[in-house]
Amino acid sequence: FGYLVKPFAHDKDAIQALVLFAEVAAYYKSQGKTFADGLEELFEKFGYFEEKTISLDFPGIHGNDEMGAIISQFRDKQPDTIGGLKVMRAQDFSKSTETAVNGKITTLPQPKANVLKYWLEDGSWVAIRPSGT
């Protein structure tokens, strides 16, 4: 799915992640360690991280309309909980807004995009992003 370290590249084609990987590997090699050794050190220091991407396909001539209807439903009625966890903050990147559970609204600095992101009480988050790719 790609990764951007800095915004100087306009596509998440993995080239930045590859260069960063090589830099980290070289750093640990200079210490007589493998990349796996270094990664384990990072896990011990910062903890483990789990990510799961669920990609749904909406083929055909009406697929784009279906995606639009789904995100509109989420935008019109924000969920209070996801997976049994309370939604603490909701970000709507199309409006550049973040709404906290107490109703406080702040402005997001990121460029506008058709993305919704929900931050949950345990610190995890869920994002919804329709894509035509």
Image (spheres, helix red, strand yellow):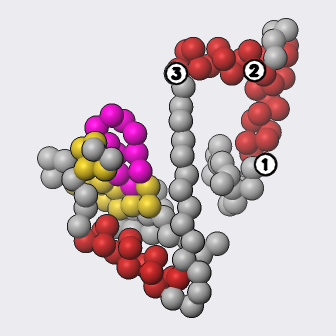
At numbered mark 1, what does the secondary structure look like: helix, strand or loop?
Answer: helix
Q: Amino acid at mark 3?
A: Gly
At numbered mark 3, what does the secondary structure look like: helix, strand or loop?
Answer: loop
Q: Nearer the viewer, mark 3 or mark 1?
A: 3
Whichever of callouts 2 and 3 sits on the residue coming sooner in the sequence is 2
Q: Is residue 72 magenta?
A: no
The mark found on residue 15 in the picture is 1
Reading the image, the residue beneath label 3 is: 47
Q: Around disc 2, counting alpha carbons within 10 Å, would you say few (fewer than 14), some (14 to 19), or many (20 or more)? A: few
Q: Amino acid at mark 1?
A: Ile
Q: Main secondary structure of the magenta part?
A: strand
Q: Around disc 3, counting alpha carbons within 10 Å, would you say few (fewer than 14), some (14 to 19), or many (20 or more)? A: few
Q: Amino acid at mark 2?
A: Ala
> Visible in this render: residue 60?
yes
The location of residue 29, given as percent across then percent down, is 85, 16
Does residue 54 appear to the left or right of 68 in the view shown?
right
Whichever of callouts 1 and 2 sits on the residue coming sooner in the sequence is 1
Identify the residue at horizontal 25%, vertical 61% (top origin). Answer: 78
Q: Around disc 1, counting alpha carbons within 10 Å, would you say few (fewer than 14), some (14 to 19), or many (20 or more)? A: some
Residue that extends furthest to the left in the rendered view of this protein? 102
Identify the residue at horizontal 65%, vertical 48% (top origin). Answer: 4
Image: magenta residue range: 117-126
